[in-house]
Image (spheres, rainbow, N blue to C red):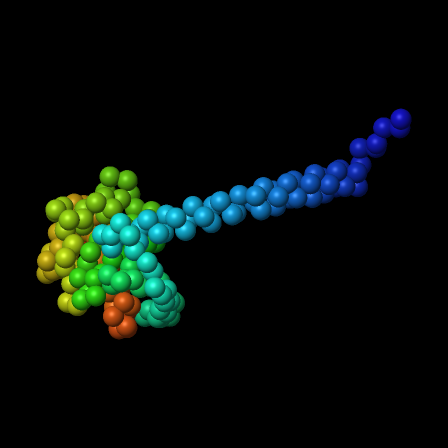
Amino acid sequence: MKKLESSLVNMVLVLTGVAVVMGGVLAWVNHLTSGPIDVQKQQALENGIKTVMQADQLTVSKTDTVKTTDAKGKEQIYIIYNNEKGAAVESTAMGFGGQLKVLVGFDNDGNILGYTLLEHQETPGLGAKADQWFQKGQKGDIIGKNPSSPLTVSKDGGQVDAITASTITSRAFLLAVNNAYNAYKGQAADVQTGASKPNSNE
């Protein structure tokens, strides 16, 4: 059998063939795994909603999407999961390390029932403490508070203790909570971000 010549054309053909085969394999694997991944994400969201609403059993009656535009013209999207106890609202703000995404539960009067961090890129041991810092019984406890008067950190004259050495993260977190409340109540979301204020902490 004659050996293939080692030419540029042959190398390109072989590499193209390998790329096509690998692309097909990856598409097939993605097709196999996309269903289970979507089911896992949905289950995690359902569990998150129950957690922030402080309920073992809960039915989402309606899902709304509220869109606003911030001062820089960037679109802000809030997803509201309405239920018999009130609503769970997805909200984001820019933290110290990147986007901070929270799910906040409100009762029908707008009082905070609970929250969970869905995504964040904050510094481990500092800003990442936001997942516990503002929970019931903790130093920055916001549970039971009503953001009809926006929640702010004590450093800015507010009533919430900021995470130690993580004021930017704390401001961003509270901004996300305040905006979630505003979206839930159908008000215009606060476009001012305290997360951009300069300070010596994180």
Whole-percent x and y of residue 22?
65, 40
Which residue extends farthest bottom? 187
Res. 159 in view: yes
- Which quadrant: the N terminus? top right
Question: Percent position (x, y) of residue 180?
Answer: 27, 63
In the depicted view, which residue is nearer to us: 34 or 190?
34
Q: Name the one closer to the observer, 164 or 39.
A: 39
Q: Picture quarter containing residue 125?
A: top left
Q: Residue at x 64, y 41 (%)?
A: 25
User: Residue 5: where, in percent of width, then height?
Assistant: 83, 32
Residue 76 visible from this viewpoint: no
At a point 80% along the width and 33% down the height, the residue shown is 6
Near-viewer residue (157 or 148): 148
Count of picture labels = 0
Residue lying farthest to the right in this orientation: 1
Q: Position of residue 72 (x, y in %)?
A: 35, 68
Task: Give left or right: position of 179 versus 13.
Answer: left
| Residue located 31% across and 50% down the image | 48
Indicate whether 125 appears above or below 83: above
Instruction: Indicate the quadrant where residue 147 lies.
Output: bottom left
Looking at the image, residue 29 lies above or below residue 85: above
Determine which quarter of the picture holds residue 78. Answer: bottom left
| 1 on left or right of 88 | right
